[in-house]
Amino acid sequence: MSQWPPPPDLESLRELFAAADVEGLIADDCPIDEYDPEAKHFLDLTKGWKTANFTSEYILPVLIKLFEEQFPNQRPGGLEKQKHLAQQIERFFGPAAQPQTRQSS
């Protein structure tokens, strides 16, 4: 029997990080994979977390530190986008996660 909700996977995190576009780089015509290193780093930092820890309360501090390290001169509005990203990660991988289906591009 498979675990529900599933633990975060790199592909899903890449999609969530790109959609959040915290620094507005994709909006500025950077490649869609611009945040892949941050998604990978987040996955590494949270590997082994229990589902109960995938809430905004636990996720947001990790994202804040991650983005501060990667982007020392953050753009205005970054914190709000980080909060939204934390909420999306919680929505997909947190304790209240519901089955989702990906839409084809």
Image (tube, rainbow, N blue to C red):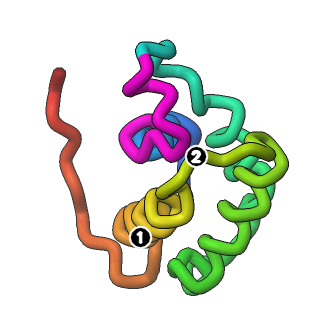
Q: Does residue 91 appear in the picture of this structure?
A: yes
Spot occupied by residue 59 in the image (x, y as percentages of width and height): 61, 72
Judging by the rendered image, the residue that carries numbered circle 2 is: 75
Q: Amino acid at mark 1?
A: Gln
Q: Can you tell which mark lies on residue 87?
A: 1
Identified at 41% across, 46% down, the residue is 20
Q: Relative to the observer, which residue lies in front, 34 or 95?
A: 34
Q: Relative to the observer, which residue lies in front, 71 or 1?
A: 71
Range of residues picked out in magenta: 18-28
Q: Can you tell which mark lies on residue 4?
A: none
Q: Relative to the observer, which residue lies in front, 97 or 62?
A: 62
Q: Earlier in the sequence, mark 2 or mark 1?
A: 2
Q: Amino acid at mark 2?
A: Arg
Indicate the quadrant where residue 104 lies.
Answer: top left
Quadrant of the frame with the C terminus? top left
Spot occupied by residue 95 in the image (x, y as percentages of width and height): 43, 83
